[in-house]
Amino acid sequence: MKILVVLGNRMNDDGTFSDAMMDRLNKTLSVAEDFDKIVVTGGVANPTAGLAEGDMMCKWLVENGVAMTKIVVENRSHTTKENAKFTAPILKGLGAEEVTLLSSAYHIDRKMYNPLRLFKKYTKLKSIEVIRA
């Protein structure tokens, strides 16, 4: 199974998406057909907004034409490390054979809490592709 994992980004205080998150969502729409499942990951990182990133990404994707049956939501994580830790069992349960991470370039390429390293650690997958939004 070919799976896309879309990493969340802190919601704005008024409950809208950040520019970085909109870039990730728009990129997700452009590649959605290439994947069997899309996992959106992110909890309530901004208590003022009070909205889980994963839930809001799912809602937006469905409103923009992605089938709900194609989306799996992880909505408990607050950090990149938790994104990886909480998404790993979801990927295992889906029988992931190919995994691609989608995030902003600055996020994917950072040295501390690097998403690619964290996902490899928690999923035990040796090869994970990356899409930079």
Image (cartoon, rainbow, N blue to C red):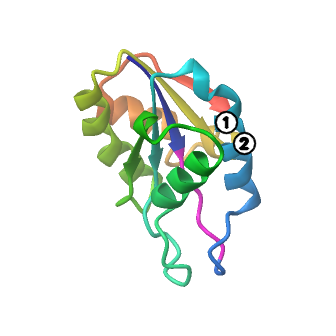
Residues at circles 1 and 2 in contact by the CB criterion of under 8 Å: yes
Q: What's the CA distance linking mark 1 and mark 2?
A: 5 Å
Closer to the camera in the image, 60 or 91: 60
Residue 128, horizontal then vertical, whole percent: 48, 22
- The image quadrant where one finds the C terminus is top right
User: Measuring 66% from the left and 73% from the top, which residue is drawn there?
Assistant: 12
Circle 2 sits in a helix, a strand or a loop, which is it? Answer: helix
Mark 2 residue crowding within 10 angstroms, few (<14) / some (14–19) / many (20+): some
User: Measuring 47% from the left and 45% from the top, which residue is drawn there?
Assistant: 40
Could you tell whether 93 is left or right of 119 in the image? left
According to the picture, the residue beneath numbered tag 1 turns out to be 29
Circle 2: residue type = Asn
Can residue 89 be seen at all in this image of the molecule? yes
Circle 1 sits in a helix, a strand or a loop, which is it? Answer: helix
Residue 124, horizontal then vertical, whole percent: 29, 25
According to the picture, the residue beneath numbered tag 2 turns out to be 26
Q: Quadrant of residue 2?
A: top left
Circle 1: residue type = Leu
Q: Quadrant of residue 106?
A: top right
Closer to the camera in the image, 102 or 106: 102
Could you tell whether 61 is left or right of 36 in the image? right
Mark 1 residue crowding within 10 angstroms, few (<14) / some (14–19) / many (20+): few
Residue 74, horizontal then vertical, whole percent: 37, 51
Q: Does the magenta stretch mainly form a helix, a strand or a loop?
A: loop
- The image quadrant where one finds the N terminus is top left
> 125 above or below 59?
above
- Please give the range of residues in magenta: 7-12
Could you tell whether 6 is left or right of 93 in the image? right
Q: Is residue 100 magenta?
A: no
Closer to the camera in the image, 111 or 81: 81
Residue 6, horizontal then vertical, whole percent: 54, 41
